[in-house]
């Protein structure tokens, strides 16, 4: 039923020249939940994620978003429908200020993006909302720094603020804590918890302990297929999961 | 970090107004010092280079066929003035419109490719325009369209007069330059900048990046056409030189030498290249070698170009 699930996939498959990276994955993301996609290296998490956000085209299968078939849609179009992604390597516009970073996203939402004959000052009306969003992720005082000057963890926060500017219904986070120190990690986890309060989040994670207290549902992928699905308690006790993780050297 | 707690003032553009005022003052005085025909030639090429820079420097697209926009507009403007008997302002406008239309067609074909593929498609299409210009009746083949009447602009400005012609060319150049400044510092310019900085991220924010690139491409083509049309009226000539692929190379040289992605760089670059061609003309084909040496030195020693390096030294965008 379209009402219960915001995103569904049916037998989603991606083949790269004979190598099957994602094989018949059926995902159902419940509206309003935090859903994590985990698995060891090479399990097909990121490929799966790129399929969902249309950065890759599936070889077979269907993707339904709010009951609509988006299997053949363009990435920019699904973003406009409210399905917005983040990237594994923090995706900011490095030589724009933080305020401008967020404003670029607001511009799309409020339609001021084609005006080449108007002054930049036409964008000043978006500054308040941009500042609000920066404050929401704890970056208010850095608004006029350029993004490249930020430490890694704060770039992540900026990315989330930019994503939130689009008021997405479904937020897709690609390894939001990848490469992060302990201190940044705590801050980003808290941030995700906060933004997940009134929207659906689907995240890819490498680290089982990060998703433990964040997610309602966890899907474990291994070798391109769904191994098991359930809440943390169920998943973490599953012998296959333990084996998959232990087997590749992760506790 | 202590630095983080004190937000730095937003990088201002005020100094650019001062440089612009200086540039205008210079161009008002120069024709009394230097031969105006040389200046008009340099101004036409400066506008061409600025238009090209809008694409390479601010959109991140390397076109290797920009001569087609300069040359095609030259033919159309010359034909309009000579055969149709249009006044110069309408002839130039016709050339500009033709280049914009050509830009739209070329852009639609090329815009989905990047890097070397984009460059090659634009080059191939420019070669097609070249051979068309060589074969078509109205372009006059090897002879080009000669003795194009300069006419009377707006019914009052007699362009036969050298100084009047100069100030008209200056006005056209400044109008084009200001339009480019406006585009760069517009809401559209912000999106262009975002696309150049991180294209996948711009897509993920819902931007259909091809549309933005296409608009930038058409703008660049139209402004190149404005330069080409004006040039045809000034020199009373439209010829194969302006559609030849070497012209596409020359505009790359001008832009890189001056500094791509800088406002004033292409102007400086165009003046240097045109000055070399004019004042080293007695060297004959050695000019090409001299240009090549300058280009190599530029790429090896100051990759940001003259203005780009200066801007870095002063820590200000120029």
Image: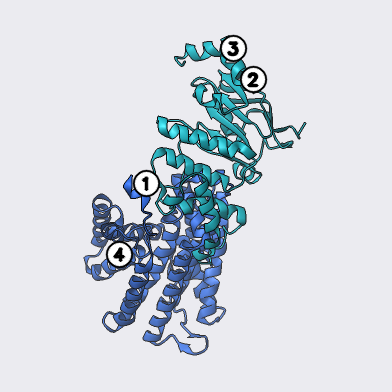
Chain colours: A cyan, B blue
Q: Chain of mark 4?
A: B
> Is residue B200 in sight in this rendering?
no
- Of circles 4 and 2, the one toward us is 2
Residue at numbered disc 4: B273
A102 up-or-down from B29: above or below: above
Q: Position of residue A157 (x, y in %)?
A: 48, 41
Labels 3 & 2 near each other (Cβ < 8 A): yes
**3D distance between C-alphas at marks 3 and 4:** 72 Å
Q: Helix or strand or loop: what does disc 4 sit on?
A: helix
- Give the mark, 2 or 1, whose residue is nearer the N terminus: 1
Residue position for label 3: A238
For residue B46, above or below residue A82: below
For the residues labelled 4 and 2, the Cα–Cα distance comes to: 69 Å
Q: Nearer the viewer, mark 3 or mark 4?
A: 3
Q: Is residue B229 left or right of residue B46?
A: right
Image: A79 above or below B214: above
CB within 8 Å, label 2 to label 1:
no
């Amino acid at each position: 039923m379209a009402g219960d699930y915001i995103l569904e996939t049916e037998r989603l498959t991606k083949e790269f020249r004979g190598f099957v990276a994602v094989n018949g994955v059926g995902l159902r993301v419940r509206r309003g939940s935090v859903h994590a996609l985990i698995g060891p290296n090479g399990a097909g998490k990121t490929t799966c994620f790129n399929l969902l956000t249309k950065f890759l085209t599936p070889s077979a299968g269907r993707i339904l978003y709010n009951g609509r078939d988006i299997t053949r849609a363009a990435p920019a179009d699904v973003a406009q429908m409210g399905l917005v992604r983040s990237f594994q390597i923090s995706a900011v516009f490095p030589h724009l200020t933080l305020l401008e970073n967020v404003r670029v996203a607001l511009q799309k939402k409020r339609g001021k993006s084609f005006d080449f004959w108007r002054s930049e000052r036409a964008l000043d009306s978006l500054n308040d909302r941009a500042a609000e969003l920066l404050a929401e992720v704890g970056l208010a005082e850095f608004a006029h720094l350029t993004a490249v000057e930020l430490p890694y963890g704060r770039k992540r926060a900026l990315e989330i603020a930019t994503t939130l500017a689009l008021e997405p219904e479904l937020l897709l986070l690609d390894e939001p804590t990848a490469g992060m120190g302990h201190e940044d990690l705590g801050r980003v986890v808290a941030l995700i918890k906060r933004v997940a309060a009134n929207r659906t989040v689907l995240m890819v994670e490498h680290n089982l302990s990060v998703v433990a207290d964040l997610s309602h549902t966890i899907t474990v992928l291994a070798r391109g297929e769904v191994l098991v699905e359930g809440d943390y308690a169920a998943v973490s006790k599953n012998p296959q999961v333990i084996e998959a993780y232990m087997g590749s050297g992760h506790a | 970090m202590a630095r983080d707690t004190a937000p730095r003032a937003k990088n201002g553009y005020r100094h650019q107004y001062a440089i612009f005022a200086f540039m205008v003052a210079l161009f008002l005085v120069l024709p009394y010092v230097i031969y105006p025909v040389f200046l008009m030639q340099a101004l036409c090429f400066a506008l061409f280079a600025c238009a090209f820079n809008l694409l390479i420097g601010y959109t991140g697209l390397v076109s290797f066929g920009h001569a087609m926009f300069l040359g095609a507009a030259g033919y159309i403007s010359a034909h309009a003035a000579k055969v149709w008997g249009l006044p110069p302002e309408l002839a130039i406008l016709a050339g500009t419109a033709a280049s914009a239309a050509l830009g739209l067609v070329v852009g639609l074909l090329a815009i989905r490719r990047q890097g070397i593929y984009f460059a090659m498609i634009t080059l191939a299409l420019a070669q097609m325009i070249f051979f068309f210009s060589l074969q078509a009746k109205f372009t006059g083949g090897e002879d080009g369209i000669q003795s194009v009447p300069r006419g009377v602009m707006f019914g009052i400005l007699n362009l036969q007069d050298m100084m009047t012609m100069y100030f008209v060319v200056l006005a056209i150049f400044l109008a084009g330059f200001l339009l480019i400044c406006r585009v760069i510092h517009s809401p559209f310019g912000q999106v262009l900048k975002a696309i150049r900085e991180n294209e996948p991220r711009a897509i993920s924010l819902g931007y259909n990046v091809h549309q933005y690139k296409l608009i930038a491409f058409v703008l660049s083509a139209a402004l190149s056409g404005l330069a080409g049309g004006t040039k045809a009226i000034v020199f009373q000539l439209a010829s194969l030189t302006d559609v030849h692929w070497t012209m596409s190379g020359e505009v790359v040289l001008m832009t890189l030498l001056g500094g791509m992605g800088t406002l004033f760089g292409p102007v400086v670059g165009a003046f240097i290249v045109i000055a070399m061609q004019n004042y080293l003309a007695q060297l004959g084909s050695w000019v090409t070698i001299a240009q090549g040496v300058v280009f190599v030195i530029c790429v090896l020693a100051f990759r940001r170009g003259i203005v780009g390096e200066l801007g870095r030294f002063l820590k200000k965008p120029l």
